Amino acid sequence: EPEVTQTPSHQVTQMGQEVILRCVPISNHLYFYWYRQILGQKVEFLVSFYNNEISEKSEIFDDQFSVERPDGSNFTLKIRSTKLEDSAMYFCASSDGGGSDTQYFGPGTRLTVL
Amino acid sequence: QKEVEQNSGPLSVPEGAIASLNCTYSDRVSQSFFWYRQYSGKSPELIMSIYSNGDKEDGRFTAQLNKASQYVSLLIRDSQPSDSATYLCAVRINAGGTSYGKLTFGQGTILTVHP
């Protein structure tokens, strides 16, 4: 069964460093999303991406964040200068945008900022 | 503020019982409703989606939607210890009739099924 994959599973970084989180969405899906979940809190939407551009972003997704689809398979989230409060699980999701709007989530990347 | 509210629990039920999980949402234009299950340290896993008022059954799971009351629920019949997890209610607003868009999640209800 097709699934969303994410790498790395765990990323540890120093405050102020740049990190890139990688995702491979399900192959025939057209819509891509990033969510984050701070430990013990709810899952929060960051950004959605369609047709090589951002379609919606939350107020969390400030200038420190960017997304890119560098090739036909990968979808990345970059945090330019990490802060302690960026420590969270980051989930990538995708949906096919056809008859179903169901979003399928990847396993997540745990980001720890020291 | 548009929100999704769930009773955080924990909800504890004995094995074999029915677990009832509830969710309310504030935005009346919400159109798509989802229940996800999340085990500790793992990602949300889709259980069911529901779009129309009424009940939708899938195996041991039944989702119920009442748009007039802005209420969606999930019933788990014959609960098993393996059902112990956090259950997330998520809502999507179909802006402009599109089939994509952000999900707004509730804080989740922790369910414990004890043998």
Image (cartoon, coloured by chain):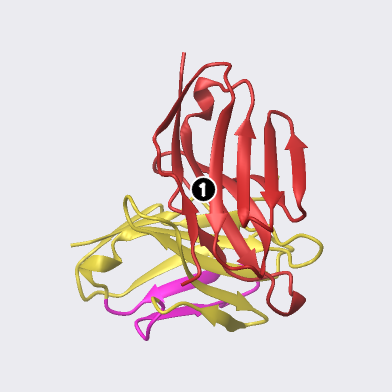
Chain colours: A yellow, B red
Q: What residue do we see at 68% from left, 42% from top? A: B63
What span is colored magenta in the figure? A61-81
In the rendered structure, does residue A62 fall within the stretch colored magenta?
yes
Residue B81 visible in image: yes
Q: Position of residue A13 (x, y in %)?
A: 24, 64
Q: What residue do we see at 19% from left, 71% from top? A: A15
- Left or right: A69 in relation to B97: left
Characterize the local packing of mark 1: few (<14), some (14-19) or many (20 or more) Cα atoms within 10 angstroms: many
Q: What residue do we see at 69% from left, 49% from top? A: B65
Residue A4 visible in image: no
Extreme-top residue of the structure: B115
Which subunit holds the residue at mark 1? B
Q: Quadrant of residue A14?
A: bottom left
Q: What residue do we see at 63% from left, 34% from top? A: B75
Extreme-front residue of the structure: B69
Q: Nearer the viewer, residue A11 or B2?
A: B2
Say which element carries label 1: strand
Amino acid at dot 1: Leu
Q: Where's the C terminus of chain A, which quadrant?
A: bottom left
Q: Position of residue A93 (x, y in %)?
A: 57, 61
Numbered marks: total: 1
Q: Position of residue A97 (x, y in %)?
A: 74, 67
Q: Quickly name the residue at label 1.
A: B88
Q: Nearer the viewer, residue B60 or B8?
A: B8
In the rendered structure, does residue A71 fall within the stretch colored magenta?
yes
Extreme-right residue of the structure: A99
Q: Position of residue A85 (x, y in %)?
A: 25, 67
Q: Where's the N terminus of chain A, which quadrant?
A: top right
Q: Nearer the viewer, residue B87 or B17?
A: B17
- Left or right: A40 in relation to B57: left
